[in-house]
Image (spheres, coloured by chain):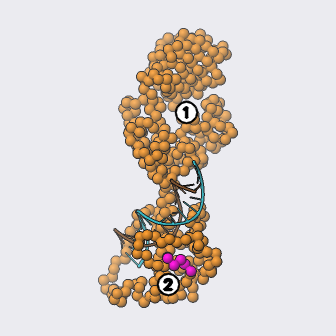
Chain colours: A orange, B brown, C cyan
Amino acid sequence: MFSTSFEDYCDFNESICSNDSGFDRSYNDTLCTPISTSTPVIHDTSDNGISLTPAKQTHARRKLFSDDYESPFPNPIEDITAFEDNIKVDNTSTPIKKERKPKDPNKPKRKYANGKNRVTRCKSPTQILRIKRNRRMKANDRERNRMHMLNEALDRLRCVLPTFPEDTKLTKIETLRFAHNYIFALSQTLESLDNINSGQIPTEGLSLNYEKLQNYSIQGEKITKDAFRDIFLLPSKPDDHDGSYRNFQGFSRPFPNGSNFLQTPEGVLINVGNVTVSVNNKGGNCITSTTGSGFFTNPASFGDDLNQQNYYQRPYGPCNYEGYDTTNTGTEEYFNQKNYELFKNAFENAKDKRYQKTIEFTNDYSKFTSPVYNCNDMHSYNGESNEYLQNTYYYNDQRYYRNFYRNNNIVNAQI
DNA sequence: TAGGCCATCTGGTCCT
DNA sequence: AGGACCAGATGGCCTA
């Protein structure tokens, strides 16, 4: 009688072909009709209860038959997982060649009747249709499984792409475009790093604008070197006098005498909390914080014209202003190459600690009150949503957000 | 409601 | 013979 094994049910084998005990379901006739045209057959899947979207997590499969259909099998789709394991050959699309047993030259070849192959010989039209139907079902399952593996690969690719916002799910085509552009951007970054090592490009401001990169990809634009310059945040040129700003390495310190306003020969400084705003008579304005970051509103103030910020934005070195650092009386120019390197190192150290701090924060919220980074951390933290804000200098890289949400499961998106 | 995206089915083709 | 791959067709779901 009927087999109750799913493997027997689904696999095409000689037993099915050689006897007439196969199932006789009221399957859609079009499935059994050989089609010679490439135009697919229109079949109404709703009629037989097929769910076109299986639940991936549970590996639930589509419902093959309608509820009123009385199957000759008690539970024909009972062991679908075992079936999937059977048809899943490998994780790659490239099939692995299996070693075949060497043929025995002495073994007589099997003879078949003239004009009949193994399928058609001694088979009634009903049997042939049943065979074709089973082959079609197997092919459908393989195709479905193949597409699932393809989608899983796309999901893995999505995981390593720095989308913006973080929870954005790119479509398939967007994922491929973004991956292409991202790889290009990373390769250009490496090239730029080589230039840095050779001294052709300064290091500060070296980062990628992932949002722009993603927008390029979604719009289907291929990243070229010109486009890359648009998404690659190179530092402003020294001759920019258009009011643009640039990051620099500075440190704000409390004013002497507890005041929050100080006038100097080059301008004025206003201290608000841990942030110092300086207005330079020569047009160069800057903002600094106690944590070591800052920016100029006019790059012209960078370099030789930085006398003003020298007063209260240095963690080291001499100072000749009354009430500030009486132990140092040096009068040499403050913002020289040496001090720049000191600032730079301090800046990098602070940045590294911030990164570490980000990871610590994911594990222990109480550490967030660290006094060392309290000022800027508070600027970067949204206490209501328990998230770091993205519009800050250090936490605008969503790679760290991804790590945050994935329990520090770091992905290979480091530059 | 139109359009985009997606999963699925399907037949054809190529290869083993 | 059968599996992998492909592309066309179709319908479901979602969103503007």
Magenta region: A26-30
Which amino acid type is marked by label 2? Ile
A102, above or below A126, in the image: above
Q: Mark 2 = which residue?
A: A16
Q: Which residue is mark 1?
A: A393
Element on which disc 1 rests? loop
Disc 1 sits on a residue from what chain?
Answer: A
x and y, in percent, of residue A220 in the image? 44, 47
Secondary structure character of the magenta stretch overall: loop
Dot 1 surroundings within 10 Å: few (below 14), some, or many (20 or more)?
A: few
Name the residue: 55% across, 71% down: A44
- Does dot 2 land on a helix, a strand or a loop? helix
* For marks 1 and 2 on the same chain, the one whose residue lies earlier in the sequence: 2
User: Do marks 1 and 2 both belong to one polypeptide chain?
Assistant: yes
Q: How many numbered marks have been drawn onto this rendered protein structure? A: 2
Q: In 3D space, how far apart are the residues under numbered discs 1 and 2 (Cα atoms)?
A: 68 Å
Which amino acid, by three-letter code, is at mark 1?
Answer: Tyr
Q: Please name whichever residue, A159 or A334, is drawn nearer the observer in this view of the structure.
A: A159
Relative to residue A50, is residue A74 depicted above or below? below
Is residue A7 visible in the rendered structure shown here? no
Which residue appears at 55% of the width and 13% of the height?
A: A267
Residue A398: in magenta span: no
Indicate the quadrant containing the N terminus of chain A: top left, top right, bottom left or bottom right.
Answer: bottom right
Name the residue at 49% across, 54% down: A172
Residue A166 lies in quadrant: top right
What percent of the width, then of the height, locates residue A75? 61, 77
